[in-house]
Amino acid sequence: MPDFIYRGKVYYNPVQLVMEQIGGVWKMPILWRLKDQTMRYSELRKIPHISDKMLTTQLRELEADGYVHREVYAVVPPKTEYSLTPKGIEIIPLIAQIRDYGIKLMNE
């Protein structure tokens, strides 16, 4: 497959594009946590070992890439909820397969 440009950046293959969007240590666990319900930041913060800074950064990137929707409510105290977009829902079966493969590797 020839190189292609997506949002102004050159990619060498489609896997590279997907891994840039959902790869890394934290993005898939965040998406997985959101698969069943809308959650507030404090609930997502319970993901083991993730820092506030990393969670905020990853949520912003997932939102910018169209996987997560952020809803801010004009109430006191402030309330923000995160949920999966249709694109986020679409990626969950792939994450499930990666998770299952990880479990298989852990048991070797």
Image (spheres, grey):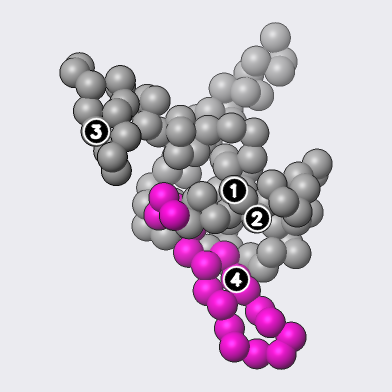
How far apart are the two marked residues, 4 and 3, measured between alpha carbons? 32 Å
Q: Earlier in the sequence, mark 2 or mark 4?
A: 2
Magenta residues, as a range?
64-82
Which image quadrant for residue 2?
A: top left
- Residue on which the image places disc 4: 81
Q: Is residue 16 visible?
A: yes
* Cβ–Cβ under 8 Å for marks 1 and 2: yes
Residue 59 picture location, percent across and down: 58, 54
| Label 3 packing within 10 angstroms: few (<14), some (14-19), many (20+) | few
Residue ID at (37%, 31%): 17
Q: Earlier in the sequence, mark 1 or mark 3?
A: 3
- Residue on which the image places disc 2: 56
At mark 1, the secondary structure is helix
- Residue on which the image places disc 3: 5
Residue 70 is one of the magenta-drawn residues: yes
| Label 4 packing within 10 angstroms: few (<14), some (14-19), many (20+) | some
How far apart are the two marked residues, 1 and 2, measured between alpha carbons? 6 Å
> 20 above or below 1?
below
At mark 4, the secondary structure is strand
Q: Nearer the viewer, mark 1 or mark 3?
A: 3
- Quarter holding the C terminus? top right
Q: Is residue 81 left or right of residue 97?
A: right
Residue ID at (52%, 63%): 83
> 79 above or below 14?
below
> Label 2 sits on what residue type?
Thr
Residue ID at (32%, 34%): 9
Q: Is residue 4 left or right of residue 42?
A: left
